[in-house]
Image (cartoon, grey):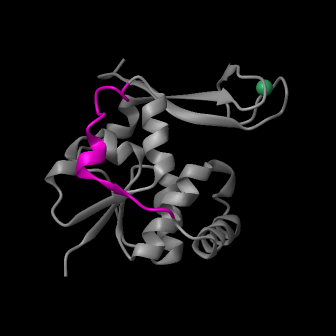
Amino acid sequence: MTAVHVLDTAALLSRSVNLLSGENITTDSVLNEINMGRLGAQIGSLREIISTRTPDRDHIERVRSAAAASGDLRSLSETDIEIVALALQANGILLSDDYSVLNLCRSLGIKAETVEKPGISRMIKWVYRCTGCGRTIESRVCPVCGHEGKRYPAKTEKGH
Ligand SMILES: [Zn+2]
């Protein structure tokens, strides 16, 4: 049996994806998140080495309930929920550096690994854009109009 690796945004941006044997999958929302950032053009060939799947509603609801119960729901985006739901559905190994995502995996009994290169998630600069007024904002909820912000990676930097 070949292992199924489920990769979140940080895992994909680590570029170690082509080193993983077996099947590599992600969700469309993860690829969209990457394409919205400046790294999109650089890694446009990702679709050739990874396939996308959509988690079904049942698994998304199971993940959402578990996140609510563990207190992680507030720090998770819709993209995070979907990638965990996909890992649950595909019985795969989730690769992520997000503490809340890893915590959620533990409570759902999903196998999870951190991204191979330590500290990679700190190299990603996350930007939120308000889905209401379009402002670039620093938090998940817009302080001006109250709509939810959508997160995407702006660029990577080696340290500061
Ligand atoms: Zn707004």
| Front residue (pair 87, 46) | 46
Residue beneath the point at 23% across and 44% down:
117
The residue at the point 29 percent across, 22 percent down is 158
State the image coordinates of residue 124 (x, y, percent, origin top left). 40, 31
Residue at 32 percent of width and 39 percent of height = 13
Name the residue located 52 percent from the left edge and 75 percent from the top edge: 108
Eyeballing the image, is 79 above or below 15?
below
Going by the image, does 30 lie left or right of 64? left
Q: Image quadrant of residue 61?
A: bottom right
Residue ranking furthest to the right: 145
Where does residue 55 sit, x and y in percent of width and height? 52, 66
Q: Quadrant of residue 63?
A: bottom right
Q: Is residue 150 magenta?
A: no
Check the image and name the residue furthest to the front: 48
Q: From the image, which quarter does the C terminus lie in?
A: top left
Is 126 positioned to the left or the right of 146 in the image? left
Question: Could you say where residue 111 lies in the image, as x and y percent from the top left?
Answer: 37, 72
Viewer-closest of 133 and 13? 133
**Residues drawn in magenta:** 39-54
